[in-house]
Amino acid sequence: MQLSLRLVANRTMSTSTVVYIVVMIAIIVGVDLLFLRSKPLERLIVNVGIVVLFLTVYMRFAKKG
């Protein structure tokens, strides 16, 4: 029982990570609503690009250490 509680405690996200994810989602939704409303294929491509960009920046800067 104690081992499983430790595993859950080690997997909690920091506040900065949660804020980073919320900002990413807000940018995706904003771009979708402002520019790509009626273009489903372009939406998918741009959304994947935004996620890859955010993931690259996160892995490069936020996870040092």
Image (cartoon, grey):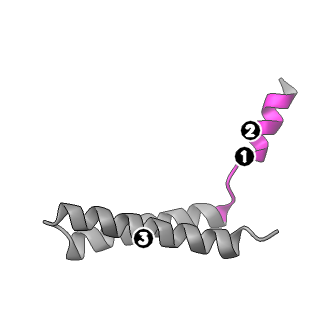
Q: Residues within 10 Å of mark 1 (few under 14, many from 20)?
A: few
Which of the labelled discs sits on residue 8, or is there none?
2
Can residue 1 be seen by looking at this rendering?
yes
How crowded pointer 2 is (Cα within 10 Å; few <14, some 14-19, many 20+) is rated as: few
Amino acid carrying label 2: it is Val
Give the side of residue 47 with respect to residue 35, left or right.
Answer: right
Q: Residue at x 83, y 37 (%)?
A: 6
Q: Which mark is residue 65?
A: none
Range drawn in magenta = 3-15
Residue 34, position in %: x, y? 22, 76
Between marks 3 and 2, how big is the CA–CA gap? 29 Å
Q: Residue at x 59, y 75 (%)?
A: 57
Q: CA distance from mark 1 to mark 3?
A: 25 Å
In this orientation, which residue lies closer to the viewer: 4 or 63?
63
Circles 1 and 2: CB distance less than 8 Å?
yes
- Say whether disc 1 or disc 3 marks the residue closer to the N-terminus: 1
Residue situated in front as seen by the camera: 6 or 52: 52
Tell me the quadrant of the picture where the C terminus can be found: bottom right
Residue 7: within the magenta?
yes
In the rendered image, residue 29, in percent from the top left (x then y), is placed at: 32, 66
